Image (cartoon, rainbow, N blue to C red):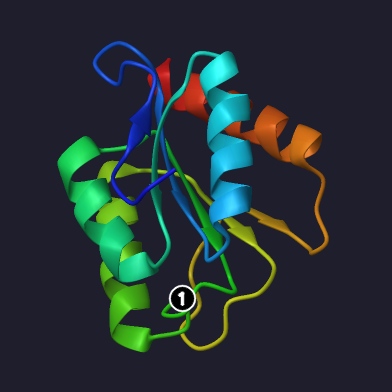
Amino acid sequence: MKAGASSGDSSSSPCVVIVGPSADCREVLSAALAQRGLATYAAPAARTALRLIRDHEPDVVVLDGDSADANDGSIQAELEAQLAARHTPLIVLGRVRGQTLLPLQVLAKPYHFAPLVHTIQKLAAAKAA
């Protein structure tokens, strides 16, 4: 899925922003979430995701620690501020160096998609409630 592209209808569906360097991983995760009724927006880098988070106010953000700018301190600070202001859960895939982001969930790599999708669904449902 291209940066900013969505699957599903974000006006009535829980929304997820997916940040990761692998287009294949973003597409697979977006497709799995869309099948479960979640709208998704995907970005290859955290800087792009910041705009998506502002524009779409997601219920969950998934950040791959291998994203090119995931370890940039200024981007981490802005990401954390945006998520804290909206009480948005963050799932980190792998590790993020530098400033300590406050994720609700950290999944070590390699991870499996099924538990990740389940966790995202659970967090999105809890935020919507």
Q: Is residue 109 left or right of residue 35?
A: right
Q: Is residue 97 left or right of residue 51?
A: right
Please name the residue shown 83% across and 61% down the image.
Answer: 110
Q: Which quarter of the rendering shows the N terminus?
A: top left
Q: Is residue 94 left or right of residue 73?
A: right
The percent coordinates of residue 23 (x first, y second) are 54, 55
At mark 1, the secondary structure is loop
Closer to the camera in the image, 111 or 79: 111
The percent coordinates of residue 97 (x first, y second) are 57, 85
- Examine the rendered structure and indicate whether residue 36 appears above or below residue 114: above
Please name the residue shown 58% across and 77% down the image.
Answer: 96
Please name the residue shown 55% across and 41% down the image.
Answer: 27
Q: How many marks?
A: 1
Mark 1, residue position: 70
Q: Which quarter of the rendering shows the C terminus?
A: top left
Q: Amino acid at mark 1?
A: Ala
Farthest residue to the left: give it: 55
| Residue 117 visible, this angle | yes
Closer to the camera in the image, 6 or 124: 6
The percent coordinates of residue 82 (x first, y second) are 26, 56
